[in-house]
């Protein structure tokens, strides 16, 4: 009885000692871990801040580029309108110039007709005056004298009748010439007015063409300025995109480094705890007197859905939407290495731990949102035995805390599309020693 009591006391003392040492190591690990990873975490935070600033600049640049493109379309449309208007003005100018030339020719013809009419009138007036003088000399004679000069009665009446006919004909001719002169004068006035009006029209069209030419020159200069700004904006956007790619790679590397550091520390802590337990057990065994070694009881093994002890991270859908390896990046449109696999695809669906382990990173900058953020967005990293770690990215919401132990199949988050993502899914990675592995070798 005494021996059994001693044995129980020794075992209890060993258990208490083991528990104290384990708690000490855990407290020591809790205190040391942030210091161990502080530098990498700080670098990661700075890189994320730079990425956010860069994303804001890219968004602003895209908005400016859209405004420039809109301005270019408007200016190009105005330039096309000016070109069409200028062509129309040139046609009008040619038409009016031809009309002006015709008006000048018409005015010249009218002037010539007026001059000819005046000359004809003057000549007829001279002839008329000569005839009037002859007729006047006859009128000074008496009818008796005319009768005597005529020789007989027939010639007398013939002479009187001829004089009357000549006078009437000359009067009609003078009237016709006067009418012709008035008509020529009217034609001259009309031709002069037409020429004057056409000269004004042609001058107006010339002024309009000059104004259109100046507008076209100004619009071309404006269009060239917009195109230059668009070219510079495209260069800036290309530079910012390249910087975004560089930052994305840097963030991925820093995340991997931080996970490797924390995973290594977790493994070291587990080894230290096991060593402390072994030391405590050895001391307890050494202090036991005349006690036979008892058969140790092993802890029950965790359930293993597949032969390697892994479960599928997205229950209910075993399709792989984007495999591990090289691919065309869906956002940056460049060829990049895909460090994991993309699974699932519905907002709010549960994401589970792929294996037993301890949560070492919980990052949720946009907690509860379907979209937003950069990089992995809201994500969780779990450390597993054997130096392995798993990452679950682009979550809508994280459901675990740092330092929390999880079992395979435990819910750790909800599916979303946060970070650099084009739609709801879970980006799942498996890492060891800081390098990614093909997840299908573990969960497939």
Image (cartoon, helix red, strand yellow):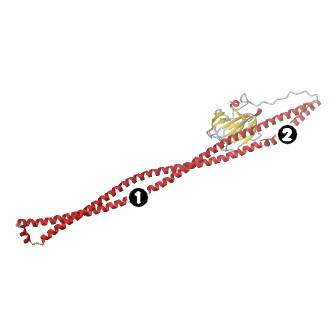
Q: Quadrant of the N terminus?
A: top right
- Residue at the spot 53% in from the left edge and 52% down from the top edge: 222
Above or below, 287 against 104 in this view is: above
Assign a secondary structure to mark 1: helix
Assign a secondary structure to mark 2: helix
Q: Quadrant of the C terminus?
A: top right
Query: Is 322 displayed left or right of 385 in the figure?
Result: left
Query: Is 55 displayed left or right of 405 in the figure?
Result: left
Residue sticking out furthest to the left: 152
Classed neighbour count for the residue bearing mark 1: other residues with Cα under 10 Å, few (<14), some (14–19), many (≥20): some
Say which residue label 2 marks: 24
Q: Position of residue 186 (x, y in %)?
A: 29, 62
392 or 4, which is in the foreground? Answer: 392
- Quarter residue 320 falls in: top right
- Residue at the spot 51% in from the left edge and 52% down from the top edge: 219
- Please tell me the numbered disc located at residue 229: none
Q: Counting residues from the N terminus, which is met first, the one under dot 1 or under dot 2?
A: 2
Classed neighbour count for the residue bearing mark 2: other residues with Cα under 10 Å, few (<14), some (14–19), many (≥20): few
Residue sticking out furthest to the right: 2
Above or below, 440 against 111 in this view is: above
Q: Position of residue 379 (x, y in %)?
A: 70, 40
282 or 352, which is in the foreground? Answer: 282
285 or 66, which is in the foreground? Answer: 66
Say which residue label 1 marks: 203
On the question of residue 1 being in view, the answer is no
- Quarter residue 177 falls in: bottom left
Determine the CA span between mark 1 and mark 2.
Answer: 102 Å
On the question of residue 359 being in view, the answer is yes
Give the number of the mark in front: 1 or 2.
1
């Amino acid at each position: 009885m005494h021996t059994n009591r001693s044995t129980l006391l020794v075992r209890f003392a060993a258990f208490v000692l083991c528990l104290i040492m384990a708690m000490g190591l855990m407290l020591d690990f809790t205190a040391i871990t942030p210091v161990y990873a502080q530098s990498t975490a700080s670098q990661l935070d700075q890189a994320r801040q730079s990425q956010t600033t860069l994303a804001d600049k890219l968004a602003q640049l895209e908005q400016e580029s859209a405004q420039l493109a809109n301005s270019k379309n408007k200016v190009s449309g105005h330039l096309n309108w000016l070109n069409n208007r200028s062509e129309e003005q040139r046609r009008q100018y040619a038409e009016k110039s031809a009309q002006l030339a015709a008006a000048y020719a018409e005015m010249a013809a009218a002037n010539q007709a007026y001059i000819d009419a005046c000359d004809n009138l003057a000549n007829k007036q001279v002839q008329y005056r000569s005839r009037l003088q002859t007729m006047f000399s006859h009128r000074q004679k008496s009818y008796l004298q005319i009768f005597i000069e005529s020789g007989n009665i027939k010639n007398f009446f013939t002479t009187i009748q001829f004089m009357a006919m000549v006078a009437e004909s000359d009067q009609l001719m003078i009237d016709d010439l006067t009418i012709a002169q008035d008509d020529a004068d009217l034609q001259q006035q009309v031709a002069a007015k037409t020429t004057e009006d056409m000269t004004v029209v042609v001058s107006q069209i010339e002024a309009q063409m000059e104004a259109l030419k100046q507008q076209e020159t100004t619009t071309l200069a404006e269009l060239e300025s917009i195109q230059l700004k668009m070219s510079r904006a495209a260069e800036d956007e290309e530079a910012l995109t390249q910087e975004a790619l560089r930052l994305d790679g840097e963030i991925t590397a820093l995340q991997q480094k931080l996970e490797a550091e924390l995973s290594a520390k977790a493994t070291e802590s587990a080894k230290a705890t096991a060593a402390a337990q072994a030391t405590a057990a050895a001391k307890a065994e050494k202090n036991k007197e005349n006690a036979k070694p008892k058969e140790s009881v092993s802890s029950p093994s965790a359930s293993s859905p597949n032969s390697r002890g892994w479960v599928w991270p997205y229950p209910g859908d075993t399709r792989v939407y984007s495999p591990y390896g090289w691919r065309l990046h869906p956002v940056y449109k460049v060829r990049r290495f895909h460090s994991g696999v993309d699974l699932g695809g519905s907002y709010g669906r549960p994401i589970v731990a792929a294996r037993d382990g301890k949560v070492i990173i919980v990052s949720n900058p946009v907690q509860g949102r379907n979209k937003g953020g950069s990089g992995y967005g809201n994500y969780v990293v779990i450390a597993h035995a054997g130096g392995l770690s798993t990452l679950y990215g682009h979550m809508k919401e994280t459901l675990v805390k740092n330092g929390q132990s999880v079992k395979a199949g435990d819910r750790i988050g909800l599916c979303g599309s946060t970070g650099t993502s084009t739609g709801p899914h879970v980006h799942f990675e498996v890492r060891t020693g800081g390098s990614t592995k093909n997840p299908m070798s573990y969960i497939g």
